[in-house]
Amino acid sequence: MAVATFLEKYDFAGKTILPLCTNEGSGMGSSERDVKKYAKGADVKNGLAITGSQAANAKAAVEKWFSSNRLI
Ligand SMILES: Cc1cc2nc3c(=O)[nH]c(=O)nc-3n(C[C@H](O)[C@H](O)[C@H](O)COP(=O)(O)O)c2cc1C
């Protein structure tokens, strides 16, 4: 579990995490819950799940997600 180990080993206090995944139907699954569990102290925002086969058409969705998190 490489990502879980990474999140456990480092100090995320004061950091913001935006979970992003590709999938083919399972959406975010338990990813947001898991990131919150392992990245102690982080401010974990709502994630964005993109259908892998549609990733090339996801620019508008990513921009909306960034915008709603005040990144653009
Ligand atoms: C072994 C394996 C199993 C997967 N199982 C699922 C699944 O059950 N549900 C799902 O939404 N995505 C699943 N995925 C992920 C999607 O297939 C994948 O993220 C999506 O097609 C985009 O591919 P890419 O980001 O690797 O290019 C699985 C991927 C792998 C490698």
Image: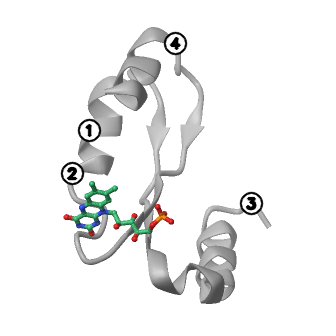
Looking at the image, how many numbered discs can be counted on the residues?
Answer: 4
**Three-letter residue code for mark 4:** Tyr
Name the residue tied to disc 1.
34
Q: Relative to 34, does residue 66 appear above or below in the rendering?
A: below
The quarter in which the N terminus is drawn is top left
**Cα gap from disc 2 to disc 4, whole angstroms:** 21 Å
Contact between labelled residues 2 and 1, with CB atoms less than 8 Å apart: yes
Q: Is residue 60 left or right of residue 42?
A: right
* Disc 1/disc 4 C-alpha distance (Å): 15 Å
Tag 3 residue: 71
Q: Nearer the viewer, mark 3 or mark 2?
A: 2
Label 3: which secondary element: loop
Vertical arrangement, residue 32 with respect to residue 20, above or below = above
The kind of residue tagged 1 is: Asp
Check disc 4 and report the residue beneath it.
Answer: 10
**Distance from label 4 to label 3 (Cα)?**
23 Å
Residue position marked by numbered label 2 in the rendering: 30
Judge the density around disc 3: few (<14), some (14-19), many (≥20) Cα neighbours within 10 Å.
Answer: few
* Gap between marks 3 and 2 measured at Cα: 24 Å
Give the number of the disc on residue 18: none
Residue drawn at x 47%, y 30% as measured from the top left = 42
Residue at left 38%, top 16%? Answer: 8
